[in-house]
Structures are given as structure tokens and as C-alpha cells.
């Protein structure tokens, strides 16, 4: 499935967790809820979710449209406020932070690939990618920038503005921007949703290698069973609740899990385990 040629990543960076060490949670949600509106108009976008995302793993979140996937990632990344419950990034309780601390957390510790990209329209692709480094007042790691640009196939598009880029190219710029500061955790909301299968495979292969070789933690939303099979684990969401999980997913086991999810409507409280 992984059609990319294997190239080691940025050997100067810190290595991933050694095998044999216990995996610790990089990200945790505890009874995390988000409600919109009140009374009859109330929407429970997220309903008392408990979930852990292990450090040094690539986790995929799957579930029907409207099941709360983006909401969960926004709350975990400190981009939106919870109605109740707690979210942790490592030992930091994200849900207890004030505005200043949240800004710092988003700047220093989290990378986010938005479902809608959120690129700055007046900036070139290159300026968009390096912006987080400049905002943090850090020094750009040119070799890492080159690795990202090369792997994501953006070399000939660096001087273009977002309006001059295809959807898939904008998506790849957004991925480079999320990774440029080498954050502890990257949240990616459908990072391959606009890519053809070959570019998608390259991006996914790259994300998986940044987890394996550089010890990054990545949580990504996807609707694609083939994409989910790149993950170490799949977490299933339905109606704002955790509806199951799949370990060491394959496209087949993910499809079976999604099928099982559809039939769960008849069995409240049941969960998919595979
Ligand atoms: N600002 C808002 N006001 C009211 N309801 C909202 C708001 N944002 C999201 N919702 C609702 O919360 C629920 C969860 O939305 P969310 O965007 O997390 O879903 P999703 O799983 O990411 O879906 P998709 O796969 O379509 O991206 C949906 O029912 C949505 O309509
Ligand atoms: Mg979404």
C-alpha cells in the first residue's frame, strides 16, 4: 500500500521511543463534552468522551460526518473551549489554561492541519509554511524545511499564493506548516481528503515515518479506510461518543469496523472492538 521510496528522515532529530518502553499518553480526554445551543436546539457535539492517544503513535479518528471528530481535535489542541470535562497534552491540562498559556501551547507544542486548510491568502506557500517559526521567534531548520518541501512535492510552488494552488497543493502546504516547528503533537483533520491516491500515499507514508523515526505523535481524522490503515490504531466516534477502536488496522478490518458501527444504532452502549 505504501508506494513511497523509503528515505530516512532528518537523522539529526531525536529518535522515536525505543521498543520495550511503555507507551505513555501524549493526549488525553476525560469526560470531555461540547454542547452547542440550548433546549430543543441543543447539539451534543461531544458527549463525555474518555480517550488516550499514545505518544509516538499515529492514531486515526473515524466516524460519520457530524460525529464530533473535528470538535474533539479542536478541544484537545486548545483551539476551542469545552463545555465540561478535561483535556490534557502530556501533563498540561489544556482545559485549565488561560488565553496567554493557550497561545503559548498552540505555538510551541501543537501542530494543526485544518479541514479547511486556513492558509493566509496574501502569503506565498513558503511564507505560510515558515510562519509558525517566525511567530515563535525561532530559527528555521532549513534542512527540515527542505525535507518537508521535497517530500510533499511543493518545490515548484513555493512562490505561489494559496489562490494559485490546487486544493491538494494547499493541503500539502498546510501539512508542512503544521510540521515545521516539530511540535510534540500534530492534529490533522482529513490531511489527505483532497489528494489523489498517489499523493495521499506519499503524505501518509511521510506522516507514519515521522512517527516511527522521529517519535512524533499524530492524531488524524480520515474517512478513508486505506488511509486509516497507515495508523497504529483507529478510534471510532459516533454521535459524539467513542464507539470503539481497531488495533493494527488493515483496510479490511477498518471497513468491517465501520460496517459494525452502522449496526450499533440498534444496540445502544455497545462498542466495536477489533
Ligand atoms: N459552531 C457550531 N454551532 C452549532 N453546532 C455545531 C457547531 N460546530 C459544530 N457543530 C455540530 O457539532 C457536531 C459535530 O461537528 P464536527 O464538525 O465535530 O463533526 P465531524 O465529525 O468533524 O464531521 P465531518 O466528518 O463532516 O467533518 C455536528 O452535528 C455539527 O453540526
Ligand atoms: Mg470534521
Image (tube, rainbow, N blue to C red):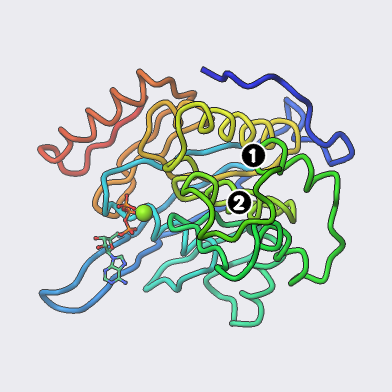
The image shows residue 74, relative to residue 264, as above or below, that is: below
- Please tell me the numbered disc located at residue 174: none
Q: Answer with left or right where residue 92 lies relative to residue 53.
A: right
Whole-percent x and y of residue 55? 64, 43
Q: Are marks 2 and 1 in contact (CB under 8 Å)?
A: yes
Query: Disc 1 designates what residue?
Result: 152
Residue visible at 38% across and 33% down? 224
The image shows residue 234, relative to residue 117, as above or below, that is: above
Respond yes or no on whether mark 1 lies under 8 Å from ligand 2.
no
Whole-percent x and y of residue 141? 85, 52
| Residue 223 picture quarter | top left
- 190 or 169: nearer the viewer: 169
Q: Answer with left or right where residue 25 lies relative to residue 29.
A: right
Task: Report the residue that reaches farthest toward the bottom.
Answer: 99
Query: Alpha carbon of mark 2 to alpha carbon of mark 1: how far?
Result: 8 Å
Q: Determine crowd level at label 1: few under 14, some 14-19, many 20+ residues with C-alpha closer than 10 A.
A: many
The image shows residue 253, relative to residue 131, as above or below, that is: above
Residue visible at 34% across and 37% down? 244
Residue visible at 40% across and 62% down? 32
Whole-percent x and y of residue 259? 22, 28
- 90 or 133: nearer the viewer: 133
Disc with the residue nearer the chain's start (2 vs 1):
1
Query: Disc 2 designates what residue?
Result: 173
**The C terminus, quarter of image:** top left
Amino acid at each position: 500500500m505504501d508506494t513511497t521510496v523509503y528515505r530516512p528522515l532528518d537523522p539529526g532529530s531525536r529518535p522515536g521511543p525505543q521498543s520495550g518502553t511503555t507507551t505513555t499518553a501524549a493526549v488525553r480526554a476525560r469526560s470531555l463534552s461540547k454542547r452547542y445551543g440550548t433546549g430543543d436546539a441543543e447539539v451534543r457535539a461531544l458527549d463525555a468522551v474518555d480517550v488516550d492517544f499514545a505518544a509516538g503513535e499515529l492514531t486515526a479518528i473515524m466516524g460519520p460526518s457530524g460525529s464530533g471528530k473535528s470538535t474533539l481535535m479542536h478541544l484537545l489542541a486548545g483551539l476551542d473551549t469545552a463545555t465540561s470535562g478535561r483535556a490534557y497534552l502530556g501533563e498540561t491540562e489544556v482545559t485549565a489554561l488561560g488565553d496567554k498559556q493557550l497561545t503559548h501551547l498552540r505555538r510551541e507544542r501543537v501542530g494543526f492541519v485544518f479541514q479547511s486548510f486556513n492558509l493566509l491568502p496574501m502569503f506565498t506557500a513558503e511564507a505560510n509554511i515558515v510562519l509558525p517559526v517566525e511567530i515563535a521567534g525561532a530559527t528555521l531548520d532549513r534542512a527540515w524545511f527542505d525535507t518537508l518541501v521535497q517530500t510533499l512535492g511543493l518545490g515548484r510552488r513555493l512562490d505561489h499564493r494559496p489562490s494559485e494552488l490546487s486544493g491538494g497543493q494547499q493541503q500539502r502546504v498546510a501539512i508542512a506548516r503544521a510540521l515545521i516547528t516539530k511540535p510534540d503533537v500534530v492534529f490533522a483533520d482529513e490531511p489527505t481528503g483532497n489528494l489523489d491516491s498517489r499523493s495521499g500515499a506519499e503524505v501518509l507514508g511521510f506522516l507514519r515515518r515521522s512517527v516511527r523515526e522521529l517519535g512524533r505523535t499524530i492524531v488524524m481524522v480520515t474517512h478513508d479506510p486505506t488511509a486509516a490503515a497507515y495508523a497504529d490504531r483507529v478510534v471510532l466516534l459516533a454521535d459524539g461518543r467513542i464507539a470503539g477502536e481497531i488495533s493494527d488496522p488493515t483496510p479490511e478490518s477498518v471497513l468491517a469496523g465501520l460496517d459494525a458501527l452502522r449496526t450499533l444504532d440498534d444496540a445502544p452502549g455497545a462498542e466495536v472492538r477489533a
